[in-house]
Image: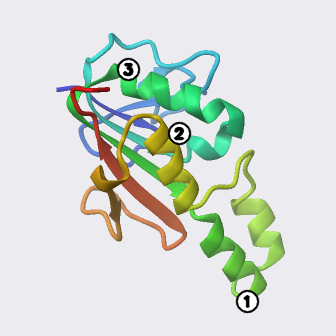
Amino acid sequence: MLKIQISPTKKVDGAMVVWHEKNDDVDLVMDARPPYGLKFKPGSVKVIYAFGLLGITRQEKIPELLKNLVEILEVGGELYIIEQDFDYILRAVLGGDLPLREFNKDYSQITHINQEEIVNFLERAGFPVKEQVWWQDSPIFHKKNSEIIIMAKKNNLQ
């Protein structure tokens, strides 16, 4: 059972860490973003944990990115999308709880995204809304308050 984590730092025990830049936590250097994509055999990955991947991908390339992730997932495999919730972050900035300096340092991304956008992207990738699960917390890794976690399972129709 192959589990991969797309993140620059180790967050999930037992998962192979894949990232586009080499560092001490990275097991395999590979860029998941288009035009590159992950080069795993189709249907060979049981679980994918994608941390911040949509945020570092241009919005128009996200459907292609998700198509690649669906392709490498086995039937019944799980895709976890973990992203910064722009709605939460924006409220924190406007409410004065998050200084603009901290926002620019810690939350600067190519694409800002919220729960509704993730749900829509996943639905277009073949994960029906009724089969997507929104996690409030995670028993597998530490979840920040500003993060959204949505899990979707690949069915045999994808």
**Disc 3 or disc 1, which is closer to the eye?**
3
User: What residue sits right under mark 3 in the picture?
Assistant: 71
Disc tally is: 3
Give the x, y percent position of residue 83: 53, 54
Q: Which amino acid does label 1 sit on?
A: Gly
Counting from the top left corner in percent of width and height, residue 117 is at 58, 54
Real-space CA distance between mark 2 and mark 1, rounded to the nearest whole angstrom: 31 Å
Q: What residue type is labelled 2?
A: Pro
The one of 129 and 39 positioned closer to us in this rendering: 129
Q: How far apart are marks 2 and 3 (CA)?
A: 22 Å
Disc 2 to disc 3: CB gap under 8 Å = no
Spatial separation of the CA atoms under disc 3 and disc 1: 41 Å
Left-right relation of 127 to 106? left
Q: Which amino acid does label 3 sit on?
A: Glu
Marked residue nearer the N-terminal end (2 or 1): 2
Residue at left offset 70%, top offset 34%: 60
Q: Nearer the viewer, residue 23 or 111?
A: 111
Of circles 2 and 3, which is in front?
3
Which label sits on residue 83? none
Q: Using residue 74 as the reference point, say whether residue 29 is left or right of it.
A: right
Q: Which mark is residue 8?
A: 2
Instruction: Tell me the SS state at disc 1.
Output: loop
At 69% from the left edge and 40% from the top edge, which residue is drawn? 59
Tag of residue 95: 1
**Residue 40 sits in which quadrant?**
top left
Q: Do the residues labelled 3 and 1 touch (CB within 8 Å)?
A: no
Quadrant, the C terminus? top left
Q: In this view, does 146 lie above or below 65?
A: below
The reply to whether residue 114 is in sight is: yes
